[in-house]
Image (tube, helix red, strand yellow):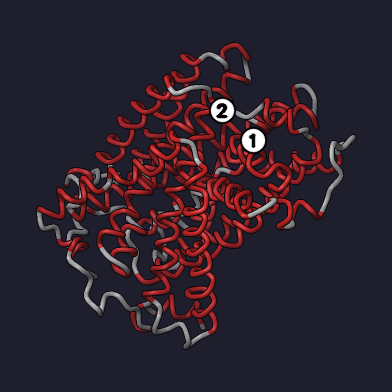
């Protein structure tokens, strides 16, 4: 393809064709982690838009689907474990490509804290409320769970997929059960209202974009399918399909549970259970031991998304190491398992350090709220860049077929503009911690970029005019068949 991808052999090779469409779709769902996202983010969303959660998830979901389509079409042109890191470089500029990849890396590392803390707390809460409130025990168990997932990722992508299928199947079955219980439960705190889906529920653009930032975090993670493209059968087609299926599933679950939460919980109950709203929800609709089942779903979901996040960041660092834009050791794989062990271990060490440091930041609720908003900023950057990139790369095909115009042009462009405007609108209203973590972490990426650019790495050579445009013949027979 280009000079930055010349060393895809030997120690730089991942396991090809290991994942099926079903595996990819499961990864897409697990990456979003519906139970975890609902449990950890509902209070933050309620704080931003009150009863307007269904509307925030709907409108952000429409924009997010534009980015899903962008990834789908970008992946058809090139399979690269770095995903946006490679695609944005090709379409726009090496600086923007590097920052897109860096945004994924730092958002994933921040999430290790936002995910590991609730993982420890949720599991301990099944046995003892006092232990669940112990910072030391929560941190210890969070680290244990995290290290188990690191081990699963190092063991190989086929083992990772099997673990995900088992956990996600149980999680989804429990969520469907409680979705039914939500809507048959009486009495209702609020009757269902179509007003929850209207723009007026936001009371202005500031409320709308505050809700959208949180909603972006809800959906984040489906793009793990793209980072696994080199390890998937039909590497240029299947990951995009898996992402589409995954986002449809989680969109439906998010809307159902957000509507249900509005109906059965008061605002006080939501705010008092900011760390795990689903725990409270479970006890309301099924008091006693039965209600604890949904906590199991949250625990499984949290563990599952930790695993997919490790995959995303390790594959991105692997692609960077392979291209020499990060230490070369990160771009090597295990001789037999064909997994980026060095990159995964580096991720583990940094994440555990951040997790321990988070003990000095504040309460679980504070950590979650600040982390969600900081990650939302980083998501907006690299998703937005992907949306603009697909329009640039497919510009000569956009008017040849309606499918190209809508799904590789108009919808991704709408999604990209949405992400850019959301970033600009919410930034002034965020607290200092969120700004420092969200923007400061992005700016740190310019340091390694400058170092490796100075070393003359091929990745930083501007793409040629030929690279920056996709023709029908570049897509391959299997991909072309999908567009006919």
Q: Nearer the viewer, residue 113 or 422?
A: 422
x, y (%) of residue 286? 80, 29
Q: Which mark is residue 402?
A: none
Q: In the shown orientation, is residue 350 left or right of residue 283?
A: left
Q: Is residue 260 left or right of residue 80?
A: right
Q: Which residue is disc 1 drawn over?
A: 43
On the image, the x and y values in percent for residue 216 come to: 54, 50
**Mark 1 touches mark 2? (CB < 8 Å):** yes
In the drawing, does residue 208 fall left or right of residue 304? Answer: right
Residue 271 visible? yes
Seen in the picture, residue 259 relative to 276 is either above or below; the reply is below
* Nearest the eye: 419 or 129: 419
Going 56% across and 28% down the picture, which residue do you hit? Answer: 365
User: In percent of the image, x 52 and y 55: which residue is there?
Assistant: 422
Question: Above or below — where is 132 with respect to 327?
Answer: above
Query: Which comes sooner in the sequence, label 1 or label 2?
Result: 1
Residue 123 sits in quarter: top right
Q: Nearer the viewer, residue 395 or 257?
A: 395
* Position in image of residue 423 (x %, y %): 47, 53
Mark sitting on residue 365? 2
Q: Secondary structure at mark 2?
A: helix
SS class, disc 1: helix
């Amino acid at each position: 393809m280009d000079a930055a991808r010349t060393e895809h052999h030997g120690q730089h090779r991942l396991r090809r064709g290991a994942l099926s469409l079903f595996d990819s779709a499961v990864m897409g769902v697990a990456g979003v982690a519906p139970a975890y996202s609902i449990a950890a983010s509902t209070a933050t969303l309620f704080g931003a838009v009150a009863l307007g959660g269904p509307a925030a998830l709907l409108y952000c979901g429409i924009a997010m689907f534009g980015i899903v389509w962008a990834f789908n079409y970008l992946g058809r042109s090139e399979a690269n474990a770095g995903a946006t890191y490679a695609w944005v470089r090709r379409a726009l500029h090496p600086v923007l490509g590097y920052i897109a990849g860096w945004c994924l890396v730092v958002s994933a590392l921040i999430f290790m804290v936002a995910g590991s803390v609730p993982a420890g707390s949720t599991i301990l809460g099944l046995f003892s409320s006092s232990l669940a409130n112990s910072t030391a025990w929560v941190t210890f168990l969070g680290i244990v769970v995290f290290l188990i997932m690191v081990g699963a990722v190092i063991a190989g992508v086929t083992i990772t997929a099997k673990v995900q299928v088992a956990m996600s199947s149980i999680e989804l079955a429990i969520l469907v059960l409680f979705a039914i219980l939500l809507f048959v439960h009486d009495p209702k705190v609020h009757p269902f209202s179509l007003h929850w889906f209207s723009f007026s529920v936001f009371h202005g653009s500031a409320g709308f974009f505050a809700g959208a930032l949180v909603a972006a975090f809800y959906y984040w993670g489906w793009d793990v399918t793209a980072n696994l493209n080199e390890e998937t059968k039909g590497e240029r087609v299947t990951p995009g399909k898996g992402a589409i299926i995954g986002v449809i599933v989680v969109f439906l679950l998010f809307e159902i549970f957000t509507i249900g939460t509005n109906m059965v919980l008061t605002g006080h109950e939501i705010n008092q259970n900011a760390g795990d709203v689903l725990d409270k929800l479970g006890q309301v609709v099924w008091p006693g031991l039965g209600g604890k089942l949904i906590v199991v779903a949250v625990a499984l979901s949290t563990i599952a998304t930790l695993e997919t996040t490790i995959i995303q960041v390790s594959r991105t660092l692997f692609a960077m190491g392979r291209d020499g834009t990060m230490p070369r050791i990160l771009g090597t794989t295990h001789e037999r398992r064909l997994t980026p062990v060095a990159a995964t271990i580096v991720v583990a060490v940094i994440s555990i350090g951040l997790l321990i440091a988070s003990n000095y930041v504040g309460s679980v609720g504070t950590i979650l709220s600040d982390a969600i908003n900081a990650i939302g900023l980083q998501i907006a950057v690299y998703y937005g860049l992907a949306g603009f990139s697909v329009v640039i790369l497919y510009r000569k095909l956009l008017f040849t077929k309606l499918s190209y115009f809508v799904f590789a042009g108009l919808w991704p462009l709408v999604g990209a503009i949405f992400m850019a405007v959301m970033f600009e609108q919410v930034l002034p209203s965020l607290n200092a911690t969120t700004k420092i973590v969200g923007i400061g972490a992005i700016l740190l990426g310019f340091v390694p970029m400058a170092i490796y650019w100075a070393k003359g790495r091929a990745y930083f050579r501007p793409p040629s005019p030929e690279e920056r445009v996709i023709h029908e013949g570049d897509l391959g027979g299997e991909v072309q068949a999908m567009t006919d």
